[in-house]
Amino acid sequence: MSSENSSADDVQRVWDVVVVGAGPAGASAAYAAAVAGRSVLLLEKAELPRYKTCGGGIIGPSRDSLPPGFELPLRDRAHAVTFSHNGRFNRTRRSKQMLFGLINRAEFDQQLVEHAQKAGAELRTGVTVQRVEQHGSAVPDRRTVAVFLQGGETVLARAVVGADGSASRIAAHVGVKPAQVDLGLEAEIPVPQTVAEDWQGRVLIDWGPMPGSYGWVFPKGDTLTVGVISARGEGAATKRYLEGFIGRLGLAGFEPSISSGHLTRCRADDSPLSRGRVLVCGDAAGLLEPWTREGISFALRSGRLAGEWAVRIAEAHDAVDTRRQALNYAFAIKAGLGIEMSVGSSLLAVFERRPGLFHAALTGFRPAWNAFRDITRGSTSLAEIVRVHPMAQRALTALDRRPVGPVGGEATEVSS
Ligand SMILES: Cc1cc2nc3c(=O)[nH]c(=O)nc-3n(C[C@H](O)[C@H](O)[C@H](O)COP(=O)(O)OP(=O)(O)OC[C@H]3O[C@@H](n4cnc5c(N)ncnc54)[C@H](O)[C@@H]3O)c2cc1C
């Protein structure tokens, strides 16, 4: 316990930065603010380690965004990908080098939190944040934010980072607007050793029957994470897709240890990233790759930036300086992750109409496979490929027939 509101006579402690949510975004924000020497309180509603519905695929940009000295708790390393199109046309592509790593989120997230703690952040678990206030009787002055916890306690901060996931309460305060909402369903399936050996080092990606949907098998030693994702609003069809997918793979006879679902939300282009002294990052901000719905690297990268800018906001003495720092944070996000999201949403628009084209390209056209390999390994990004290869940009623009601005431009809208 660190907040000092034990008696009415005490002057209540004001933290430099309070971070809400201890997933990859929150742990990264807390780490970044703590290594800058600021007092940081990290609030998490669950007890750690906690389960999170997630494939646990760690691509190159995620590996590159980890704190120094962080050792990935890898359960497997993907060197091969089997692609299928709604269960048919299976084709496996292999790579000598690791394409991406596979982790168990409970372990990975806990380890990230421990790094933040080692850097000096204080952690409180089992604490649900209900809301924040920047004005009113609970707020002693204009430089302070009041964070209300379930149970009646209030903590004070100079800056708050909302990293409380896709159902974020802090996002509601900031006014985050989603442009794309998807439902992911997953089963953790313990399997016998012979089945586990068959999957070792190989993932499966299946282009699904509903527009924009796909499924995956991610092996993690004695357990396979099998999941599907599709646009929200088709819950029954998404469930049928997962059941059929599991059945076709011959895995229906094994009882899942966990079956769960989770929404993902991608932000609209004009969605805010801050309000006053409150910033949002990761899923709370709707920062997620729209095509693959890869979000760990977005959470790690935006979390670090949010932590760095929260430090500057904590030091801001007036509303003008606070606004300037918040705008700088938004600029940093939009210049990097925003452009990646813009390209990703164009790709999704094409994929929704032409999944067969993607399957044919990835399995039969070497440059497409090379691009996939290089993106997952982190030696390039989709945005970089489109920027460097005018042909790729022209192809994407021609195939993406939505009424949008140039690829990567601020005006691009995301289809929902
Ligand atoms: C089915 C599925 C599969 C996915 N697979 C992958 C994948 O393979 N690779 C990948 O990169 N991404 C994947 N993602 C996306 C990825 O899981 C998320 O983008 C990532 O977890 C975002 O991290 P975060 O820290 O922003 O949020 P979260 O990981 O959701 O963390 C938020 C934290 O905030 C806490 N919290 C929530 N509300 C409160 C509150 N009021 N008070 C205090 N604490 C609170 C939660 O308990 C949680 O610990 C997948 C998503 C889904 C749905």
Image: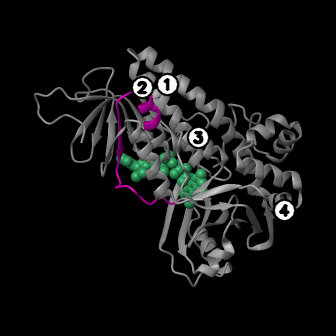
Q: Nearer the viewer, residue 252 or 168?
A: 252
Say whether disc 2 or disc 4 marks the residue closer to the N-terminus. Answer: 2
Q: Check disc 4 and report the residue beneath it.
A: 363
Marks 2/1 in contact by CB < 8 Å: the verdict is yes
Does the residue tagged 4 have its C-beta within 8 Å of any atom of ligand 1? no
Per the rendered image, the range of residues in magenta is 30-53
- Going by the numbered disc 2, the residue's amino acid type is Gly
Label drawn at residue 326: 1
Q: Splitting the image into 4 quarters, where does residue 31 fall?
A: top left
Q: Secondary structure at mark 1?
A: helix
Q: CA distance from mark 2 to mark 1?
A: 8 Å
Q: Check disc 3 and report the residue beneath it.
A: 65
Q: Secondary structure at mark 2?
A: loop
Say whether disc 1 or disc 4 marks the residue closer to the N-terminus. Answer: 1
Give the image location of residue 316, x and y in percent.
41, 17
Q: Check disc 2 and report the residue beneath it.
A: 276
Q: Residue furthest front?
A: 69
Q: Splitting the image into 4 quarters, where does residue 144 fall?
A: top left
Marks 1/4 in contact by CB < 8 Å: the verdict is no
Q: Residue at x 27, y 35 (%)?
A: 155
- Going by the numbered disc 4, the residue's amino acid type is Thr
Say whether disc 3 or disc 4 marks the residue closer to the N-terminus. Answer: 3
